[in-house]
Image (cartoon, helix red, strand yellow):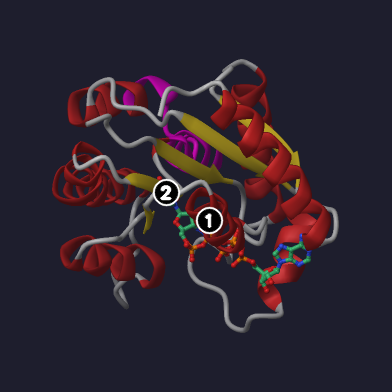
Amino acid sequence: MNKGKFIVVEGIEGAGKSTICNVIVDILSEKKIKSIITREPGGTPLAEQLRKLIKQGVEGDKLIPKAELLMIYAARIQLLDTVIQPTLAKGIWVVGDRHNLSSYVYQGAGRQIELNLIKTLSHQIIGDFKPDLTIYLDVTPEIGITRVCKRGSLDLIEQESLCFFKRVRELYLHIVANDNSMRLIDATQPLQQVITLLRITLINWLSGQII
Ligand code: Z5A
């Protein structure tokens, strides 16, 4: 049996990641490919508890950037070892709502933790595991924040400044431009147009895969 493939959707808040993960599952299902969606941080009962702490914090005890980084990697390895790897081993595909790239851009560019520390931690914790395909949904922070504000109250990371999200987007753009396992989709367009572009991108990529 062939191993499943790991497709990850990345982008700043409000880019449309959760919406697009569901569309990917539908397109895969049309091709008779079984898949599940995971999200990071989270995706297992323990990792979901860490997600809550990362997003909401604990009153009177400000989460410092390096502690946040470690909690994100704790959640990631829990999800990778107990859900993602066993699922791929069964030949089922995994569609990830965020993965390792988020740590480089949020904790690296956003929180300004040295990228070498993140690289070392990443290597020690997840080794050379990486997605087969990453779809990066590109929106400006202004558009992304406007979309999430409509949803209601903002979590700790969403409350960061526009400069924070500009740094995050810049690093996303730099990394995506230099990695041929990643595809950029302009997600500032109306949702139907984004879905059409995604379909073309995914079907082109699938045609080059041995399934
Ligand atoms: N984080 C980190 O710091 N480091 C890491 O390593 C990892 C994560 C893995 C996860 O929070 C937080 O963790 C995240 C980064 C940090 N921080 N923040 N902030 P989350 O999962 O709650 O948030 P998110 O990942 O940023 O996702 P989101 O805010 O839910 O947005 P989204 O998934 O990209 O978008 P959506 O939910 O699909 O759509 C948002 C709204 O926009 C919704 O009403 C849609 O209908 C609408 N939408 C979507 N696309 C369009 C288009 N094209 N036009 C118009 N409207 C649209």
Using the image, determine if residue 205 lies above or below residue 160. above
Q: Is residue 67 magenta?
A: no
Q: 198 or 170: which is nearer to us?
A: 198
Q: Amino acid at mark 1?
A: Cys
Circles 1 and 2: CB atoms closer than 8 Å: yes
Q: Which residues are magenta?
A: 101-117
Q: 194 or 45: which is nearer to us?
A: 194
Mark 1 and mark 2: Cα distance apart in space: 7 Å
Q: Residue at x 32, y 71 (%)?
A: 52
Give neighbour class at mark 1: few <14, some 14-19, many 20+ (Cα, 10 Å): many
Residue under pointer 1: 21
Q: Could you tell whether 90 is left or right of 202 in the image?
A: left
Q: Amino acid at mark 2?
A: Gly
Give the SS element for disc 1: helix
Q: Residue at x 69, y 34 (%)?
A: 184
Quadrant showing the N terminus: top left
Q: 61 or 146: which is nearer to us?
A: 146
- The picture places residue 180, in percent across and down from the top left corner, at 58, 17
- The picture places residue 8, in percent across and down from the top left corner, at 47, 42
Q: Residue at x 80, y 60 (%)?
A: 192
Quadrant showing the C terminus: top left
- Is residue 140 visible in the rendered image? The answer is no
Q: 18 or 56: which is nearer to us?
A: 18
